[in-house]
Amino acid sequence: MPFKPIPTLLAIATALIIWFVIPVPEGVTPNAWHMLALFVATIVAIIGKALPIGAIAIIAVTLVALTGVTSDSPSTAISDALSSFSSPLIWLIGVAVMISRGLIKTGLGNRIAYYFISIFGKKSIGVAYSLAAAELMVAPITPSNTARGGGIIHPIMKSIAQSFDSTPEAGTQNKIGRYLAMVNYHSNPITSGMFITATAPNPLVVDLVNKATGSEIQLSWTTWAVAMFIPGMLCLLVMPWVIYFLYPPELKATPNAKTFATDNLEKMGKVSQAEKIMLGVFALMLLLWANIPAMILGDAFSVNATTTAFIGLSVLILTGVLSWDDILKEKSAWDTIVWFGALIMMASYLSKLGLIDWFAGSIETMIGTTGVGWVGAVVILTLVYLYIHYFFASTTAHITALFAAFYAVGLSLGAPPMLYALILAAAGNIMMTLTHYATGTAPIIFNSGYVTLGEWWRLGAVMSVVNLVLWIGAGLLWWKLLGYY
């Protein structure tokens, strides 16, 4: 079968029960309730991996158009179902994933990692910080955190571990491989939270915040990066030591790591022309995303974030660093455009049809009766929002399903819009730490065998608390200084 029977049946049953069995609540229109049925069924199918997520998205678009939940007019219904595919946010992510292919093709991602290890690789903690630093360097232009942590950093981490004869097959993973695998993974959620373009769901958060506040709060690339940099750096500095304390490597000194990195850099030779172009494109995009030309020369030189991504991709095509075949073969980019577009469309119409407002009002009433005030409400909402991720296998599905409702409730209870947006945005990345299926990077690193299931879940729970305390604690001070509340 092309689909998994049990998850498929669960998704179908979910849709039918919500659509036909559960009565439409007072204050909710039938169309809104039917859209919810399709939406929840889609999320169930994604979590259960009934089909590849892109295929599920195509079916979801078809059902939205066919059932007419947005409009009685067939032509309007299909236009509504396809409406999000013109969203600049979707193309920002898709194009940025295409650009990240250049890091792998040119070898620049590997060179950056080897360079850091050649400098800081005398001790295992130094190797760990090198992996984290390499993650941080490439994060702004790799919106697929799976490609970054699993496709670029993880193969290097495994090569380092193997150079010390630390492998699961030999039963020697505790020498250094387990520690490095843990650092490899737990760097990923932190760097994902530091830049809008570091993971696919972040632009969705930007879009949902913008809509919820009537465009009052618009998180630009620069605003996000400045707000998240200090808390993120603090977490990145502390994380390797926390793991070192809980799961110390048997090897404390690693002089061979520097040799390993140096040898690989020598094999790579001098920086190639393609790598130089990639570096130049990287620098250009960061300047434009940070809005530096507009700051110096005026608003006339401001460039939209998605336009910036297209500029970067165009330069790589014109210079031959990436060919059109490379871009066509970047299946994850086209896949992301399809499923991201479908999910944004459904989430958008849940809001337009009034369901999000109704749901938020219901939660608001429940929390309001406790008398905890907006501070207590934000604490409760954030903890629930974060730890409910144990039931999700996709951060995108989680954020699409819950962010708008949780954000609306916090605002209605008096939470400062910018502060609460940053708190939920941080929680949306911290939740990746929890399980071996929390995000796409997790199964790649877990399946390499360096970390047992028990170790993964225990460390995930600990790091979620550490990151949450550090990120929100430092964030409250930093964001107050920035005047965000």
Image (spheres, rainbow, N blue to C red):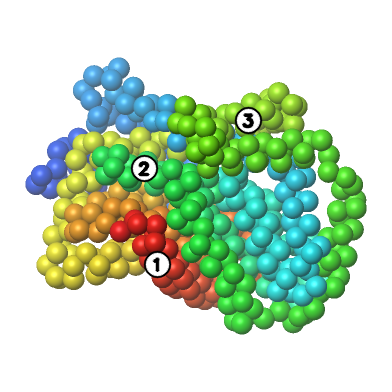
Q: Distance between the Cα atoms at labels 2 and 3?
A: 25 Å
The residue tagged with tag 1: helix, strand or loop? helix
Where disc 2 sits, the SS reads loop
Residue at 24% x, 31% y is 69
Are discs 3 and 1 less than 8 Å apart at CB? no
Quadrant (top left/top right/bottom left/bottom right) for the C terminus: bottom left
458 relative position to 103: left or right = left
Q: Nearer the viewer, mark 3 or mark 1?
A: 1
Q: Which mark is residue 218?
A: 2
Q: Nearer the viewer, mark 2 or mark 1?
A: 1
For marks 2 and 1 on the same chain, the one whose residue lies earlier in the sequence: 2
Q: Earlier in the sequence, mark 2 or mark 3?
A: 2
Please provide percent x and percent y for residue 101. Answer: 67, 39
Please tell me which residue lies in front, 23 or 137: 137
Determine the residue positioned at 40% across, 67% down.
Answer: 477
Q: Secondary structure at mark 3?
A: helix
Work out whether residue 354 can be spotted: yes
Other residues around mark 1 within 10 Å, as few (<14) / some (14–19) / many (≥20): few
Few, some or many residues within 10 Å of mark 3 (<14, 14–19, 20+): many
Instruction: Give the spatial CA distance, label 3 vs label 1.
Output: 38 Å
Three-letter code for the amino acid on which mark 1 is drawn: Leu
Separation (CA) of disc 2 from disc 1: 21 Å
Asked if residue 173 can be seen in this view, the reply is no
Q: Which residue is mark 1?
A: 477
According to the picture, the residue beneath numbered tag 3 turns out to be 313
